[in-house]
Image: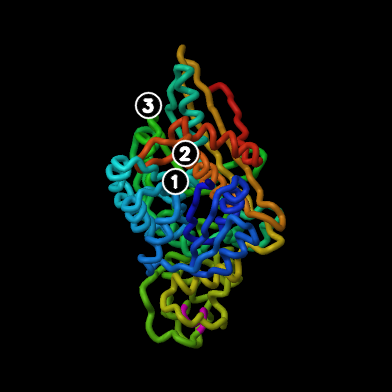
Amino acid sequence: MARKVLVLGAGMVSRPLVVYLLKHRFQVTVATRTVAKARALLGKHRSGKAVAWTTDDPDSLRKLVGRADLVVSLLPPAHHVAVGNVCLELGKHLLTTSYVGDAMRALDGPARERGLVFMNEIGLDPGIDHMSAMRIIHRVGRRGGKVVSFRSTTGALPSHGSNNNPFGYKFSWAPRGVLLASRNPARWLEDGREVNIPGERLFENYTLEEVEGVGTFENYPNRDSVQYRDIYGLKDARTVYRGTFRMPGWCETLRKVVALGWLDDRPVQGFAGRTYGDLTRHLVNAGPGEDLPAAVAAFLHLETYSAVIKRLGWLGLFGDEPLPAGRDNPLDYLNLLSLKRMALGKGDQDMIVMHHEFEVELPGGKGELLTSTLVDTGIAGGDSAVARTVSLPAAIAVRLILQGKLREPGVAIPVRPAVYHPILDELEKHGIVFKERRKGL
């Protein structure tokens, strides 16, 4: 009898996962708020079923989970633990592509007791980043070497051929998540010293990095890198850094967007029926007759001809477009405007760039610099690179779990060879391949 998979959510990254599972003869139920999206994913496949469901309906969730062997939660991360608790109660495996938080980590003991696999962080970043890094770290260990510096950076970007707006960015998933990530504090190890950066100063701390054969990008720190010294077993590493790539100009522009208050999610009163320009005027306390770009430039200590002011004008923050109804805070207004102005269009292709650098000391004192680089471009008229690289690792893991090839119970991330070897090997068959280089130091 075919094993049954429940997929919660039918968002931008779900299609490759659903297609893979159907191809491998699983019975797939897709439960989502907009059932038409689920039907579009499944087509007329006889092993697929679309169900209307919302996160405020726990009774229906229990029924859906009860009929499945494994649940894939592609919901926003805040919902994963509630789904996990239902999986625990009903004895079902769980898989997510999201970071493990304290609440999910607390389910480890109960999941182990019930013999359930709760696999998390099995997408792109997190996911492929863990697996590809651990493959090299373990390889270095087998050579008797030690990693003394580790840097890993990932960017989801428009391909060079589709990079045609002044921000150098297009959204292939929800802008709100990208914008919220702009407020995260960061910490990492740099030559034995812990560096801590508050969220409001995140974009002041970027570097320019050339990735050979790909281009030059801004690289800014991504959340808490220090924890990966233990997670990856990098006991000899004096530098441990994880970052995010963006096209040049992004960091300074987003720093000024933060300074203006456009990432504030607190409600503002009295702006129903007003415009984006009206709200910007309010945020910088400009008078009604004052030139708005000039007022914003003065507020930000910039010249009116600066590239940042030009980008904000292009986005529409000085204009007369009405603020959308049903929202009440700058962050949500900006989210909708960004999606309208910078969505990845039908003719566009996105690009994933993931780049690891390892400084290694080998027996006898020899030093090496190892690099491992993934560049994956979306399929024109088909799946985006983000969808492929988030969805396919998860789909492969589902197959391995339900075929009994990944058995270790508990809350886990993909850092063990038994997990990463088969997944990375199969990803290569889908064209998701790292290019590795080595040179002496």
* Residue 247 visible in this rendered orientation of the protein: no
Closer mark to the observer between disc 1 and disc 3: 1
Q: Amino acid at mark 2?
A: His
Closer mark to the observer between disc 3 and disc 2: 2
Q: Nearer the viewer, residue 109 or 155?
A: 109
Coloration mode: rainbow
Q: Tell me the residue at 60%/69% (across/down).
A: 341
- Residue 116: percent from left, percent from top: 37, 43
- Residue 302: percent from left, percent from top: 51, 66
- Position of 155 with respect to 269 (left or right) is right
Q: Nearer the viewer, residue 270 or 109?
A: 109
What residue does disc 3 label?
236
Closer mark to the observer between disc 1 and disc 2: 1
What residue does disc 1 label?
121
Q: Quadrant of residue 355?
A: top right
* Part of the protein shown in magenta: 275-279
**Upstream in the sequence, badge 1 or badge 2?**
1
Q: Tell me the residue at 46%/72% (across/down).
A: 332
Q: Tell me the residue at 43%/51% (across/down).
A: 98
What residue does disc 2 label?
130
Marks 1 and 2 sit apart, C-alpha to C-alpha, by 9 Å
As helix, strand or loop, the secondary structure at mark 2 comes to helix
Confirm whether the magenta stretch covers residue 42: no
Marks 1 and 3 sit apart, C-alpha to C-alpha, by 25 Å
- Residue 83: percent from left, percent from top: 37, 57
- Position of 430 with respect to 201 (left or right) is right
As helix, strand or loop, the secondary structure at mark 3 comes to loop
